Image (cartoon, rainbow, N blue to C red):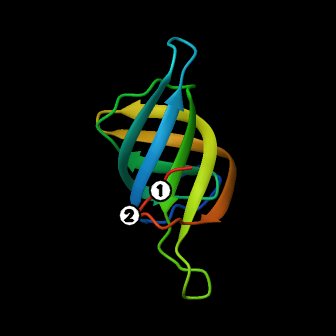
Amino acid sequence: MENVDRRRSARYPIEREIRFVVSTRRKIGNDIGTGRTINISSNGILFSTDQHMIAGSRIKLAVDWPVRLEDNCSLKLVAFGRVVRCDSGTAAVEIEQYEFRTRGNQAFDFP
């Protein structure tokens, strides 16, 4: 039997620093974490992290984008979505909304 990839969008192997904030209904407050992207599509992001997350949790994340605006201005991808899977050392997020923002003066500021 053939292994057919049924994903809606192509995955691109982009490895960049990622920072995130996860909120769950089960506890008060947010979990803040870091990791590294493994691949990105128009619908989702797979990344490595040491933090365990619960599927269904809301997440806001920022990715240090590899391309500069007009070859001069650093960018970051800011996305909002939900955790769809968390395995040992990786998490998958379904993107519901995203935007590109210019990065601040810090090496990697988080919105």
Q: Residue 59 is drawn in which quadrant? A: top right
Does residue 88 lie above or below 2 as drawn?
Answer: above
Q: Residue 73 is drawn in which quadrant? A: bottom right
Residue 15 is marked as 2
The residue at the point 35 percent across, 48 percent down is 35
Does residue 69 lie above or below 7 as drawn?
Answer: below
Residue 46 is marked as none
Judged left or right of residue 67, residue 50 is left
Q: Secondary structure at mark 2?
A: loop
Q: Residue 23 is drawn in which quadrant? A: top right
x and y percentages locating residue 34 in the rendered image: 37, 45
x and y percentages locating residue 46 in the rendered image: 45, 49
For mark 1, what is the residue? Answer: 109
Residue 3 in sight: no
x and y percentages locating residue 63 in the rendered image: 49, 58
- Callout in the foreground (2, 1): 1
Within 10 Å of disc 1 (Cα), the crowding (few <14, some 14-19, many 20+) is few
Q: Amino acid at mark 1?
A: Asp
- Frontmost residue, 37 versus 69: 69
Q: Secondary structure at mark 1?
A: loop
Within 10 Å of disc 2 (Cα), the crowding (few <14, some 14-19, many 20+) is some
